[in-house]
Amino acid sequence: MVYSRREIISKKQLFGQILLKRGLITDEQLRDALEAQKKHGGVLGEILVKLGYLTERDVVVALIVQCGFPYIAVNKYDIDPKVLTLLPEEKARQFNAIPLDKVGDVLSVVMANPLDISTIEEIEKISNCKVATFIATKTEIEEAIKRCYSKKE
């Protein structure tokens, strides 16, 4: 099932509940993370990782369950250097996203946070393409950016 961006945003509130149901965190850990989020802002999944309650992989799995984002092990993917020109390296690092493939006017982009609508819209402006999102861990994307953009030069 494919969700609209609005539906995905409305499903965001369920993230903590998914983690609880899967036994990945406790009620107390969720409360700690939500309190930290109120004080300092940020994304709940990243906060839970920083607090040591989850791994990046746990967050990705929960997002896959929550929103149905397809997962790609992008750090093992061979990306065409021409596709990389659609998103400059500094923007890829800033957004923690990397273009994967382009078919017609649709650019497939792997992101650590595919719920970040403002980033998706910015990538669409930069690339002049519609964006289809995939998910991977932040570390996998960082490794892919380092490997792929250095090859491009």
Image (cartoon, rainbow, N blue to C red):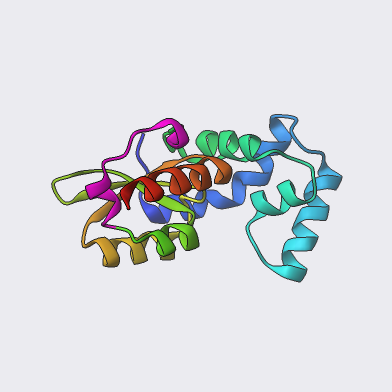
Query: Where 72 sits versus 115, above or below?
Result: above
Residue at the (72%, 46%) spot, across then down: 49
Residue nearest the observer in this picture, 91 or 115 = 91
Residue at the (74%, 67%) spot, across then down: 38
Q: Position of residue 61 (x, y in %)?
A: 57, 33
Residue at the (42%, 66%) spot, across then down: 118
- The quarter in which the N terminus is drawn is top left
- Span highlighted in magenta in the image: 73-86
* Residue farthest toward the right in the current orientation of the protein: 28
Residue nearest the observer in this picture, 86 or 44 = 86
Q: Position of residue 128 (x, y in %)?
A: 21, 62
Query: Where 103 sits versus 23, above or below?
Result: below
Is 47 on the left-hand or right-hand side of 97? right
Query: Where 28 sits versus 38, above or below?
Result: above
Q: Position of residue 64 (x, y in %)?
A: 51, 35
Can you tell which quarter of the image residue 144 is in?
A: top left
* Residue farthest toward the front in the current orientation of the protein: 153
Residue at the (49%, 63%) spot, across then down: 94
